[in-house]
């Protein structure tokens, strides 16, 4: 038995058929974990069941730092050339 629970539900497989994002992978991963005895039936819980909530020590995702706004670029002064004075 694993020291943590795995959240899985049969509804995760949306039966989309040949799709670019095949949702059947969630069922196949679960089946493979059971077949190879990485996990047992008791390691899986459905969403909303006791044990499906995040661990108390799970770190909350950090917000990415906010980049400061780029300073406004002042228009460059074009120096006068001797020809422009005439």
Image (spheres, rainbow, N blue to C red):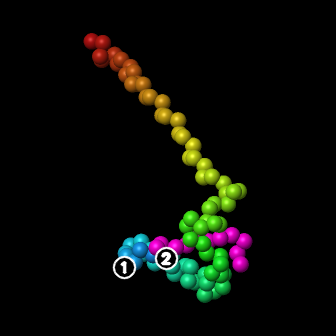
**Location of residue 65 in the rendering, given as x and y in whole percent from the top left corner:** 57, 43
Cα distance, mark 2 to mark 1?
18 Å
- Would residue 84 be found to the left or right of residue 35 on screen? left
Question: Which image quadrant is residue 8 in?
Answer: bottom right
Q: Residue drawn at (37%, 22%), measured in percent from left and top? A: 78
The residue that mark 1 highlights is: 18
- Would residue 24 be found to the left or right of residue 1 on screen? left
Quick one: quadrant of the C terminus? Answer: top left
Report the front residue among 8 and 24: 8
**Location of residue 31 in the rendering, given as x and y in whole percent from the top left corner:** 56, 83
User: Would you place residue 81 above or below residue 4 in this image?
Assistant: above
Residue lying at the far left in this picture: please name it: 86
The residue that mark 2 highlights is: 10
Q: Residues within 10 Å of mark 2 (few under 14, many from 20)?
A: few
**Location of residue 62 in the rendering, given as x and y in whole percent from the top left corner:** 60, 49
SS for callout 2: helix
**Region in magenta:** 1-12
Report the front residue among 58 and 53: 53
Q: Residue drawn at (71%, 56%), measured in percent from left and top? A: 57
User: Would you place residue 71 above or below residue 3 in this image?
Assistant: above
Q: Residues within 10 Å of mark 1 (few under 14, many from 20)?
A: few
Q: Earlier in the sequence, mark 2 or mark 1?
A: 2
Q: Residue drawn at (42%, 72%), measured in percent from left and top? A: 21
State yes or no: residue 6 in magenta. Answer: yes
State yes or no: residue 51 in magenta. Answer: no
- Would residue 59 be found to the left or right of residue 66 on screen? right
């Amino acid at each position: 038995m694993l020291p943590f629970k795995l959240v899985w539900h049969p509804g995760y497989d949306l039966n989309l058929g040949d799709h670019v994002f095949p949702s059947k992978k969630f069922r196949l991963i679960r089946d493979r974990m059971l077949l190879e005895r990485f996990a047992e039936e008791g390691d899986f819980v459905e969403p909303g069941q006791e044990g499906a909530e995040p661990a108390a020590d799970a770190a909350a995702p950090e917000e990415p730092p906010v980049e400061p706004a780029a300073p406004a670029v002042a228009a460059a002064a074009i120096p006068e050339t001797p020809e422009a004075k005439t």
